[in-house]
Image: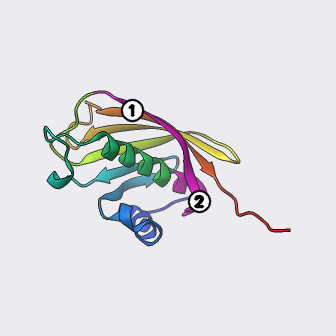
Amino acid sequence: MLLEPSEVDAFVAQVFPSAAADYRCEAIAEGTATARWKYNEARLRPGNLISGPTQFATADLALWYMSFSVLGLEPMAVTSDMQITFLRPASGGDLLARAELLRAGKTRLCGRVLLWVEGDEERPVAHVTGNYAILRPSVDP
């Protein structure tokens, strides 16, 4: 499914407006997507570091955006599990997270995410693996 980042951002603003305030889709293509957290000094932890929860949320959104490249703009692909490994402190700019599809099944998508601070892609700050459950509407008998 071919989508534009602006389409993803508009969809997210509609179905998950709180995420649209700080995050945006930077890029999307088949089986991959990149999320951006807009640098905000008010949201930094002590030491001017980008917090772990912010990094986790950015990775989670990158996986959700990536799911759109497989399923279309489907809000009910939801996080089933994620594991994050912090590699180094993150500071000094926007945070980017690139998700890549590892496997797409009937009920689950599996992916990995690499995070870095803008301008320093060769020095990742975290690595994530995660799965998204594909929820189907239930049918009442």
Q: Residue at position x 39%, y 61% from top?
A: 5
Q: Which residue is mark 2?
A: 76
Q: Residue at position x 16%, y 54% from top?
A: 42
Q: Magenta span has 75?
A: yes
* Vertical order, 108 against 129 (above or below): below
Left or right, 28 with reference to 131: left
Q: How far is mark 1 from mark 2, CA to CA?
A: 24 Å
Is any atom of residue 33 visible in this view? no
Q: Quadrant of residue 45?
A: top left
Amino acid type assigned to the residue bearing label 1 in the image:
His
Disc on res. 127: 1
Q: Residue 112 appears at what percent x and percent y?
A: 47, 36
The magenta-colored residue range is 67-87
Q: Quadrant of residue 46?
A: top left
Q: Magenta span has 135?
A: no
Q: Secondary structure at mark 2?
A: loop
Question: How many numbered marks, from 0 up?
Answer: 2
Q: Quadrant of the C terminus?
A: bottom right
Q: Residue at position x 27%, y 46% from top?
A: 95
Name the one closer to the observer, 113 or 1. Answer: 113
* Vertical order, 13 against 64 (above or below): below
Amino acid type assigned to the residue bearing label 2 in the image:
Met
Left or right, 15 with reference to 47: right
Q: Residues within 10 Å of mark 1 (few under 14, many from 20)?
A: many
Name the one closer to the observer, 115 or 121. Answer: 115
Is any atom of residue 100 visible in this view? yes
